[in-house]
Amino acid sequence: MPDIIQLLPDHIANQIAAGEVIQRPASAVKELLENAVDAGATEIQLLVNDAGKALIQVIDNGKGMSETDARMAFERHATSKIKNIDDLFHIKTMGFRGEALASIAAVAQVEIKTKTGDAVTGTYIEIENSLVKKQEPIAWQQGTSIAMKNLFFNVPARRNFLKSNAAELRYIVDEFIRVSMAFPEIFFSLSSNGQQVFHLEKGSLKQRIVQILGNNYNAKLVSIKEETDYMNIYGFVGKPETAKKTRGDQYLFVNSRFIKSAYLNHAIMNAFDQMIAKDSFPMYTLFIDLDPSQVDINVHPTKQEIKFEDEKIVYAFVQSAVKHALAQFSITPALDFELDASIQHLDAVTKPFTEEKKSSAAASSLYSTFTQKNQAHFVDKKSELKNWKDFYEPSEKKFESLLANTEQAPDDKDVPAGELHIHHSPFTKILSEAEGHHCTQLHNSYILLQNNTGILLIHQQNAHERILYERFIKATGGKPIATQQSLFPSAIQLAAADTVLLTELLPDLHYLGYHLEPFGSNAFVIQGTPADILQGSEKNAIEKMLEQYKNFSNDLKYSKREKLLRSLAWQQSVKAGTPLTAKEMLVLVEDLFTCTTPNITPNGKPTYTEFKKTELDRMFGR
């Protein structure tokens, strides 16, 4: 039997290895930027064309490389960072594996120009498919330029798996932000297809955060700085009002290296407990510095997942530091971290002490007993102490006015308040059986409706999501939603990453009634919005839509358009806890049962539950 095991050719082995390190253009961006930082650069430029598929070029003013080093840098496992095994456990640089440039050279056409400070001439090398095609001396300034062209030109199957240019550019922006955030003392710039996306001047960490995430964070950052013999932590967290529905503005660095750690994220979330909604995420940019020997960063090829020698100490330290910082800025109680935050939400604390309540309290014998001098221990046994809760109950007048506010609006006089009235519309059997019956709102979240066979309990937000979703599907299918032109168009300024995202969504948004036009760098003019968007809230609606869209960004089973439709349906739906008028409930119910699929939301949640009269009778033994 002939031998069948053989060594792979070098170029094939390199391409297989490259699959671990260079998964998409953003992977190459990360490696090249980190190499530039390690080279001691103070200015780093990133240039990309066609979202990195045609060109990725990083230019730095670092120490550069000699002719021999420039050639050796593209060999597999060639590195200047490790001399012996002990060095592997004391890593302080960004790159150290010696795989990045070799992997890039295996799947792209690479040109490198480099020169050291004391050299007379620089070195130019062309590499293709891991083979050197050309090498010659050139005139060049100190530093290095690496241009990576035609990514995956020799692995077309890998190229086919890349996403759209807009999506790949978002990945590149994410990697650029992570590296530039970690080194605010370095100038960074990013240009895409000749247009500048980022221009980040050297400065403090706070200035870099504001440059990247936007000026709205300028007055909403809380500084953190704690130092111990074991580890240091510093950076900023956003005040509770900056919390969002997505994790987008969360950056955690260990020894200046961006990492992903669900464990430490949980520690930070715990520090914000009772301060933000459970489905919200705080903004933070935190740096942890500790002895490299206490961290294993050689766990994953991208080095974004690491292991701590003692995770519990790090967890407790991070949580304590964030809590302490929030307390110092009077965002949480400073004296007692165990204070039950629910106390702060009691009616007695949150509701104003009205003049009516003041006069009622002052007239009581209990009040006079305690306000007279030296009478505190002579409490009147007949005082109204047992009725103290009355101070916090709504008065009859207030209750009556509350009822008046829920009465039928003047323009509803043709339809009895809360009564379902059907004319000539193709509603389903369920809705037809409910004709003539009343709608009642429960807990400002549910609509109760009687029909011939029992009752329907409708969740108002879930129902409205289904209605909007089907309306948006029709709009993108060729029936655009009418746009209400703004009398005074307003401009919206976005972070660079959100600008890339919104630009990608503009064609679909146009069908949905949004008319936006680019206006300079990272800005758009809002020329028109759907008619149901209140005038003056256009900016807020667009910002919330982008946040919700990013909630779906990791769900690969949905297309770009599907993510947008679901995002808008959730964002524009009437939320649970919102009081509705009789007419609003009627419209909502009627619109729901004209939907193609009225029983579930786009995400599969039920919109209503039906209770049969026979079931109700059985519950009460009838």
Image (cartoon, rainbow, N blue to C red):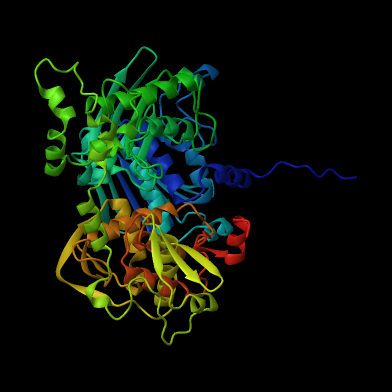
Residue 80 to residue 614: above or below:
above
Residue at 35% x, 53% y: name it.
Answer: 547
Q: Is residue 109 visible?
A: yes
The image quadrant where one finds the C terminus is: bottom right
Taking the view exactly as shown, the residue that stands out farthest to the top is 229
Residue at 42% x, 75% y: name it.
Answer: 590
Return the x and y of residue 184 as percentages of the image width and height.
26, 34
Using the image as rendered, state which of residue 246 and residue 449 is in the foreground: 449
Q: Is residue 535 left or right of residue 40?
A: left
Using the image as rendered, state which of residue 101 and residue 293 is in the foreground: 293
Taking the view exactly as shown, the residue that stands out farthest to the front is 382
Return the x and y of residue 167 as percentages of the image width and height.
42, 57
Residue 335 to residue 457: above or below:
above
Asked which quadrant contains residue 124, the reply is: top left
Taking the view exactly as shown, the residue that stands out farthest to the right is 1
Asked which quadrant contains residue 519, the reply is: bottom left
Return the x and y of residue 200 as percentages of the image width and height.
23, 43
The image quadrant where one finds the N terminus is: top right
Residue at 56% x, 46% y: name it.
Answer: 19
Q: Is residue 114 visible?
A: no
Taking the view exactly as shown, the residue that stands out farthest to the left is 373
